[in-house]
Image (cartoon, helix red, strand yellow):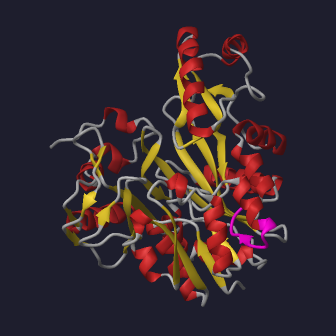
Amino acid sequence: MFKKILIANRGEIALRIIRTCHEMGIKTVAVYSKADEESLHVRFADEAVCIGPASSTDSYLHIPAIIAAAEITNVDAIHPGYGFLSENAKFSKICEENGIKFIGASPDMISKMGDKATAIKTMKKAGVPTVPGTDGIVSSFEDAKKAAKKIKYPIMLKATAGGGGKGMKVCNSDKDLKEAWKTTRREAKAAFGNDDMYMEKFIVDPRHIEIQIVGDSHGNYCHLSERDCSIQRRHQKLVEETPSPFMTDKLRKAMGDAAVKAASAVKYEGVGTVEFLVDKDRNFYFMEMNTRLQVEHTITEEVIDHDLVQEQIKVAAGIKISGMDYFPTKHSIQCRINAEDPFNDWRPSPGKITTYHAPGGHGVRIDTHVYSGYTIPPHYDSMIAKLITVAQTREEAISKMLRALNEYIIEGVKTTIPFHIQLLNNEDFRAGNFNTGFLDDFELKE
């Protein structure tokens, strides 16, 4: 087992990993930018190293500074958390070359699954259902137009290096496609340094359902059931739950088997997810594979009563997994609490938290790095906390979440708490009648 791990991340996920490491008797090293000096992950790590100024490019994405911090603190391994360098093949390779274990996927696996066109080819070969689309990269607008005619509109034009809702556009006609061919490639080039595109059939009103998978270096694979991530705004998840209210036993078995098949096809090592789109008739299609821990791993932990970060670390250390698939018996929901103003076009709301009171009670969990007096910097993602509830039924989990949201007091900045309260009181949401477009018509009342 590792003696010391550096966490190449910040905020709540860095603190989350530090806690597990300490429970396992592993020393921790936090890295931080100058803007994060007062963050709790810095305070609770055994050691902390400043790796640069506020800009993530010059700190959390600056590989030489992170490797230097790892070397001077003499760590055995680096945990990348999620976001930043967690799916960066170059970083994984550099760790390997420097004799530091990267707690995540191998460089080859990240490259294969990070390139969407290659990932789809791999899944097709493995027999995992995929959305009808091009076999690979589309090299010109004329080729794109021919492909669209074959696939039939509506289609989704997607950047092969895309992610986080960037580099994708729905097109309903040749005219739409012509405009998107310019703008989407330009956006992809700016965001990812790669403007290669592929196309696929756009599934109308789908569910976004992902399967949690685990694989080890001994060839064992299993799934830990599903999470429904359909409540999204501009492709950004806001609420996740498990099990999905849309799921049936037959569908869960089929999707679980497909996810394990996907993991086996790429000889996956670590904790990851296979993400699917599911249409109204419960046909499911592979969307992408995330070779890292997910923000919403918390709800799976709550229903299986098991620490997924600990599982990650064990797998990285060469320990075998049980290989048993899991089917849920409880229900868990997560609300992402963002420092944003939902009544003002979701504008970011950085600044000083003047009052902070966290809810508690049975079945309530909060993952956060903020506190009263903490100043939220404007340089990073606006998520400041994850509020999770778990109960025997979905109805109980929703009631518990509403009670917790009404207890949660964060003053000095705007947050998404009022949005979550209104969403969870919505009749269609409570009935499980929603899809990825649900928030397009959702009206907030001030």
Number of numbered discs on residues: 0
| Quarter-of-image position of residue 90 | bottom right
> Residue at point 43% right, 65% down?
34
Q: Is residue 4 magenta?
A: no
Residue 10 position (above or below residue 232): below
Closest to the observer, 153 or 12: 12
Q: Position of residue 328 (x, y in %)?
A: 55, 66
Closest to the observer, 95 or 326: 95
> Residue at point 66% right, 62% down?
64
Quadrant for the N terminus in the image: bottom right
Q: Is residue 255 visible?
A: yes
| Quarter-of-image position of residue 408 | bottom left
What range is drawn magenta here? Answer: 96-105
> Residue at point 59% right, 17% down?
153
Residue positioned most to the left = 446
Name the chief secondary structure element in magenta: loop
Q: Position of residue 288 (x, y in %)?
A: 65, 44
Q: Position of residue 12 (x, y in %)?
A: 44, 68
| Quarter-of-image position of residue 27 | bottom right
Residue 168 position (above or below residue 183): below
> Residue at point 80% right, 43% down?
122
